[in-house]
Image (cartoon, grey):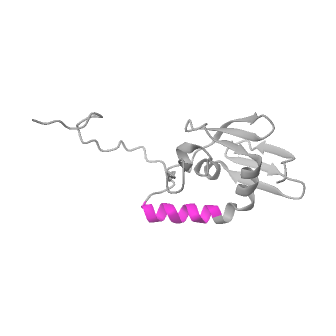
Amino acid sequence: MNLPEEIRLNSEHDLLKIRYVNQEYHLPAEFLRVYSPSAEVRGHGIGQETLQTGKRTVTITDLEAVGNYALKIVFSDGHDSGLYGWAYLQYLSENQDALWQDYLKRLAIAGETREFDSTPKKSSGCGSGGCHHK
């Protein structure tokens, strides 16, 4: 594993630039968000992943170093629970194209999109307690 020499956020806050000794990578905020290492996204085991949808316009609002081993990224949608270890960031950097294509494929299979849907979800009218009609 190589440690990054430099990490910069572009002025639009939608692209993280990571420079290693011989390579620079540009990781979009959307890509980092949908591949967050948090349990909320990845689940607690194989098959428990939650497909992230509607993240096209997400930006990075803050970056925080976590000790000498990780980066905490805070996103504009409020997500901030993933710790991006140096090895994971390197993996994302080196495999960005294949991972992105896999994500797009999973979106298509699920019939979902990258666009944010502001339409309120249709309610069953029973509230969170369920229906108890007599």
Against 108, is 61 above or below? above
Residue at the left extreme of this rendering: 134
**Residue at the spot 61% in from the left edge and 52% down from the top edge:** 35
**Residue at the spot 84% in from the left edge and 48% down from the top edge:** 3
15 and 74: which is toward the camera? 74
- The spot of residue 121 in percent (x, y) is 34, 44
Q: Quadrant of the N terminus?
A: bottom right
Q: Is residue 107 magenta?
A: yes
- The spot of residue 108 in percent (x, y) is 47, 64
> For the stretch drawn in magenta, what is the main secondary structure?
helix
Against 58, is 62 above or below? above
Q: Quadrant of residue 7?
A: top right
**Residue at the spot 27% in from the left edge and 33% down from the top edge:** 129
**Residue at the spot 44% in from the left edge and 57% down from the top edge:** 112
Judge left or right: residue 81 versus residue 16.
Answer: left
Judge left or right: residue 132 versus residue 99.
Answer: left
- The spot of residue 120 in percent (x, y) is 36, 42
Count the marks: 0
Q: Is residue 105 magenta?
A: yes
Judge left or right: residue 97 versus residue 45.
Answer: right
| Residues in magenta, as a range | 99-111
Residue at the front extreme of this rendering: 45
Residue at the right extreme of this rendering: 21
- The spot of residue 26 in percent (x, y) is 74, 54
Q: Quadrant of the C terminus?
A: top left
